[in-house]
Image (spheres, rainbow, N blue to C red):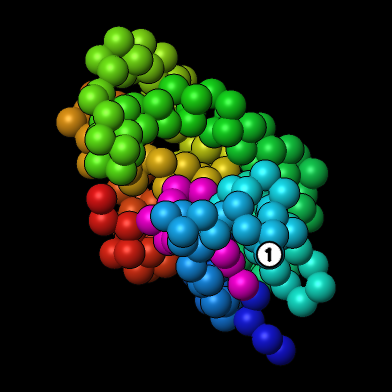
Amino acid sequence: MAPVKVFGQAMSPNVARVLVFLEEAGADYELVDVDFQAKEHKSPDHLARNPFGQIPAFQDGDLVLFESRAVAKYVARKYKTDEADLLRDGDHSEAAMVDVWTEVEAHTYSAALSPIVYECLIFPLMHGKPTDKKVVDESLGKLRKVLEVYEERLSKHRYLAGDFLSFADLNHFPYTFYFMATPHGALFESYPRVKAWWESIMSRPAIQKLSATMTP
């Protein structure tokens, strides 16, 4: 069986999101580079894979997908085993909690944290733009409130959806990894349970392998 294909660069947070789940599953995959400087993301071939001209795109035989969280969920389902049941589909209550915290990551956590990553790393390093301190300060205020909720949640459970690692936890990896490389990464020190949760995620072999390809 041919390996699945992921189109993009590993250093992209959204591409890395897909790669996390492939690495966790030990799946064979091919990472196909998309050259942004050459505008390959706007080429007819790539637009046929992702009509918005973004990365990642994903191909498994005749199936072509885009949107990183949707692709990641497909990967988690395709490679599900008794040992790697990240969506907990066999238990409706557990699956519902995975869904809840996946939504929190997408719409609350990342909404607060990702602007800091863009302002402190991506815009200055890739586009030569200065950091907008107002955006960073506003986002830090939002992030502190989110982390207070996480700290409370993690006082009751080892992981966000329960006492088991899930799809929701691993979705936090890409942007949090880059956040830790900003001048504000020490913020997690103020939330010991969040810090321990993050260190648990970072200790996973798949995460360590992928991290080596994402050094800012």
Mark 1 highlights which residue?
45
Q: Amino acid at mark 1?
A: Asp
Within 10 Å of disc 1 (Cα), the crowding (few <14, some 14-19, many 20+) is few
Q: Secondary structure at mark 1?
A: helix
Q: Residue at x 41, y 41 (%)?
A: 175
Position of 140 with respect to 181 (left or right) is right
Q: Nearer the viewer, residue 138 or 89?
A: 138
**Corner quadrant of residue 79:** bottom right
Q: Nearer the viewer, residue 99 or 216?
A: 216
Residue 81 place in picture, x, y as percent = 67, 71
Q: Residue at x 35, y 11 (%)?
A: 138
Q: Is residue 139 above or below residue 61?
A: above
Question: How many dots with numbers?
Answer: 1
Q: Residue at x 50, y 25 (%)?
A: 111
Position of 16 with respect to 73 (left or right) is left
Residue 100 place in picture, x, y as percent = 66, 32
Q: Nearer the viewer, residue 98 or 2?
A: 2
Residue located farthest toward the bottom when viewing the structure as drawn: 1
Evaluate whether residue 41 shows in this view: yes
**Corner quadrant of residue 121:** top left
Which region shows up in magenta?
A: 5-17
Q: Is residue 20 magenta?
A: no
Q: Is residue 96 above or below residue 26?
A: above
Q: Is residue 141 above or below residue 87?
A: above
Tell me the quarter of the image containing the N terminus: bottom right
**Corner quadrant of residue 101:** top right
Q: Nearer the viewer, residue 67 or 188?
A: 67
Residue 9 place in picture, x, y as percent = 45, 61
Evaluate whether residue 73 shows in this view: no
Q: Residue at x 46, y 59 (%)?
A: 38
Position of 6 with respect to 95 (left or right) is left
Residue 196 place in picture, x, y as percent = 31, 41
